[in-house]
Image (spheres, rainbow, N blue to C red):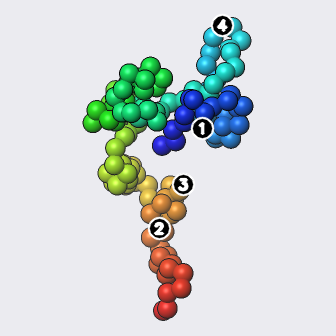
């Protein structure tokens, strides 16, 4: 997860152009928008202020992760397409979904994430065979 500090943002827009997902956005006000400090989803993780403080809530909204909750989008997703939590648990869920649908190594990114089943994993650099 990538977080930002609204106090350090100068509104240059470089993060807007660099992000392949379109996460950073300029705040919208009026018909043509308003440039200013960048805003983006924090995955309900708050900001750099003290957890659960009034300052954090005013700038970033509710810090659900500090409260021990999932992000609101993942908790409310009726199809469970959005997941949040421990990376190993998410990877296991993804792996189960892929195999259930009859896919496997042909899925884009599978070989990078989990290794290709028909090829042995490469030995670490500097290891003797």
Q: Which residue is mark 4?
A: 30
The answer to which of marks 1 and 2 sits earlier in the sequence is 1
Pair 4/1: label in front: 4
Q: CA distance from mark 1 to mark 3?
A: 18 Å
112 shown above or below 76: below
Q: Position of residue 116 (x, y in %)?
A: 48, 68
Residue at 71% across, 12% down: 32
Q: Position of residue 20 (x, y in %)?
A: 64, 41
Q: Which residue is mark 3?
A: 108
Q: Which residue is mark 1?
A: 21
Pair 4/3: label in front: 4
Q: Is residue 61 visible?
A: no
Label 3 Cα crowd, 10 Å radius (few <14 / some 14-19 / many 20+): few
The kind of secondary structure element at disc 4 is: loop
Front residue of 127 and 56: 56
Pair 4/2: label in front: 4
Q: CA distance from mark 4 to mark 3?
A: 41 Å
Pair 2/3: label in front: 2
Q: CA distance from mark 4 to mark 2?
A: 49 Å
Q: Residue furthest top?
A: 30
Q: Position of residue 41 (x, y in %)?
A: 50, 30
The answer to which of marks 2 and 3 sits earlier in the sequence is 3
Q: Is residue 89 visible?
A: yes
96 shown above or below 42: below
Image-quadrant location for residue 62: top left
Mark seen at residue 115: 2
The answer to which of marks 4 and 2 sits earlier in the sequence is 4
């Amino acid at each position: 997860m990538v977080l930002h500090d609204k106090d350090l943002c100068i509104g240059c827009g470089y993060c807007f152009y660099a992000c392949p997902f379109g996460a950073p956005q300029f705040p919208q006000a009026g018909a043509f928008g308003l440039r200013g400090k960048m805003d983006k989803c924090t995955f309900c993780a708050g900001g750099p202020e003290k957890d659960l403080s009034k300052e954090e809530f005013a700038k970033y909204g509710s810090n659900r992760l500090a409260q021990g909750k999932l992000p609101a989008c993942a908790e409310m997703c009726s199809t469970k397409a959005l997941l949040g939590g421990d990376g190993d648990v998410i990877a296991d869920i993804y792996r189960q979904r892929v195999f259930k649908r009859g896919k496997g190594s042909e899925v884009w990114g599978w070989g990078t994430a989990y290794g290709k089943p028909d090829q042995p994993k490469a030995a670490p650099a500097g290891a003797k065979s």
